Every structure is written in structure tokens, then in C-alpha cells.
Image (tube, rainbow, N blue to C red):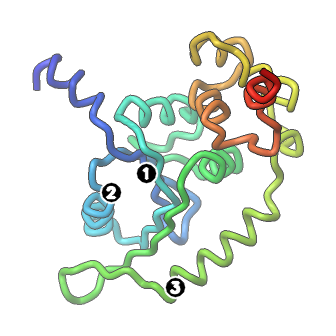
């Protein structure tokens, strides 16, 4: 592949996906234009039952940003330890589309709806009990900083550097995927005008 083709391919939109091994606290952060087809291929090559924790629309560059942000949790290639901070980031930033896939005797992959519903109920209870915002002891941000980030017009990279967080964190705040309990000061200014 030429360098130009690599750059063009890295700008193609698809989904960054998060797949967990059902019995182990590890997660794969990957990118695919067709997540369902990618999951089938992953499951075919993996003896463990795989669970899709969620997806977020993006490019390969977005996938690499996740890899850089959580490099300290890297195990090998695109596999990471599912520590609390990564779980919180996934919970806050992705579209939860959890699916459980199982290999049957036939070559096809079957979605197990009854198991899905049970897992989703358990995940929903866990999310409701999860701390948010400053209740997370490792949080580098507070509500005042989040308001400032929402109003900041600089690049995400510059904002992230000033606050000591990743660019994905800034993007998630500005797109209102995280810290949604903090009122958006941009709306208040627009309403006042």
C-alpha cells in the first residue's frame, strides 16, 4: 500500500469498536467499516465468547487516539486490560450495542437474544451505580473545567494539553457524550442573545 493510499484509508469513516472476552477482563479496541462482519471473524479466531461493549463512529485515526490514550493498559497489539478508567471511558463515550456471539456447530454465528437481555439488564444496573464526574477519584476535571472546555474555541489538542487529558476526552465533552450533567454554557449564551 502506498503512503497516499494509507492516508486516504485512515480517513474512511466506520466504527471504533470495543470487544470484551466474556470471562476475562480484557478488551480489544479496533476499527471496522462493518462491525458485525469483523466480530464474526474475531470470534472465529478466538476460543473465548466475545461481547461487543459498544461502538463509536470514527476513523482509523480515532482508533489510534484510543490506543494512545490507554497505552499504559496495553497487553498486546489492540488488546487492553479492562481497568476501571477504560470501562468508564467506554461507558461514557460509546453507543452501547452490546451483543453476545457464540459459535454453533454450523458455520454461522448466532446472536443470543435471551442472554443479551440478561447481560444488558446487568450492565444497566452497573452503569446506574457507576460514579460520574468528580465522584471518580482519578478524574482530572471538575464541572468548572468542563464548562471552560465547552466554551474554549482552540483546537482539541491544545485544550487537551492544557487540562492534561486526551483529545478524545475533549471531543466527548464538546459533543456532549460525557459530563452531560453539567449545563452547557453555550446554550445559555445563545438563549440570552
- Whole-angstrom CA distance, mark 1 to mark 3, is 20 Å
Percent of width and height locating residue 20: 50, 61
Mark 3 is surrounded, within 10 Å at the Cα level, by few (under 14), some (14 to 19) or many (20 or more) other residues, namely few
Quick check: 130 above or below 190? below
Closer to the N terminus: mark 2 or mark 1?
1
Disc 3 secondary structure class: helix
Instruction: Identify the residue at horizontal 64%, vertical 45% (top origin).
Output: 89
Q: Which residue is mark 3?
A: 115
Disc 1 secondary structure class: strand
Percent of width and height locating residue 151: 73, 19
Q: Which residue is mark 2?
A: 35
- Whole-angstrom CA distance, mark 2 to mark 1, is 7 Å
Q: Of 152 and 170, which appears nearest the observer?
A: 152
Quick check: 30 above or below 36? above
Mark 1 is surrounded, within 10 Å at the Cα level, by few (under 14), some (14 to 19) or many (20 or more) other residues, namely many
Disc 2 secondary structure class: helix
Q: Which residue is mark 1?
A: 17
Q: Residue 102 bears which disc, if any?
A: none
Looking at the image, residue 50 sits to the left or right of residue 169; the answer is left
Looking at the image, residue 15 sits to the left or right of residue 10; the answer is right
Instruction: Identify the residue at horizontal 53%, vertical 55% (top origin).
Output: 95
Closer to the N terminus: mark 1 or mark 3?
1
Q: State yes or no: discs 2 and 1 in contact (Cβ < 8 Å).
A: yes
Pick the quarter of the image with the N terminus: top left
- Whole-angstrom CA distance, mark 2 to mark 3, is 20 Å
Percent of width and height locating residue 192: 82, 24
Instruction: Identify the residue at horizontal 50%, vertical 54% (top origin).
Output: 27
Q: Of 5 and 138, which appears nearest the observer?
A: 5
Q: State yes or no: discs 1 and 3 in contact (Cβ < 8 Å).
A: no
Pick the quarter of the image with the C terminus: top right
Quick check: 100 above or below 82? below
Percent of width and height locating residue 104: 28, 86
Amino acid at each position: 500500500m502506498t503512503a497516499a493510499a494509507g492516508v486516504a484509508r485512515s480517513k474512511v469513516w466506520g466504527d471504533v469498536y470495543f470487544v470484551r472476552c466474556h470471562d476475562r477482563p480484557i478488551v480489544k479496541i479496533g476499527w471496522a467499516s462493518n462491525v458485525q462482519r469483523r466480530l464474526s471473524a474475531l470470534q472465529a479466531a478466538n476460543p473465548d465468547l466475545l461481547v461487543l461493549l459498544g461502538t463509536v463512529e470514527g476513523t482509523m485515526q480515532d482508533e489510534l487516539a484510543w490506543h494512545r490514550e490507554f497505552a499504559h493498559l496495553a497487553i498486546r497489539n489492540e488488546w487492553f486490560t479492562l481497568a476501571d478508567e477504560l470501562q468508564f471511558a467506554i461507558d461514557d463515550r460509546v453507543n452501547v450495542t452490546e451483543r453476545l456471539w457464540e459459535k454453533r456447530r454450523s458455520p454461522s454465528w448466532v446472536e443470543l437474544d435471551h442472554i443479551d437481555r440478561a447481560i444488558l439488564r446487568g450492565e444497566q444496573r452497573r452503569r446506574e451505580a457507576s460514579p460520574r464526574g468528580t465522584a471518580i477519584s482519578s478524574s482530572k476535571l471538575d464541572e468548572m473545567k468542563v464548562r471552560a472546555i465547552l466554551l474554549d474555541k482552540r483546537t482539541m489538542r491544545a485544550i487537551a494539553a492544557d487540562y492534561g487529558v486526551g483529545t478524545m476526552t475533549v471531543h466527548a465533552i464538546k459533543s456532549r457524550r460525557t459530563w452531560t450533567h453539567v449545563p452547557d454554557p453555550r446554550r445559555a449564551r445563545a438563549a440570552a442573545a
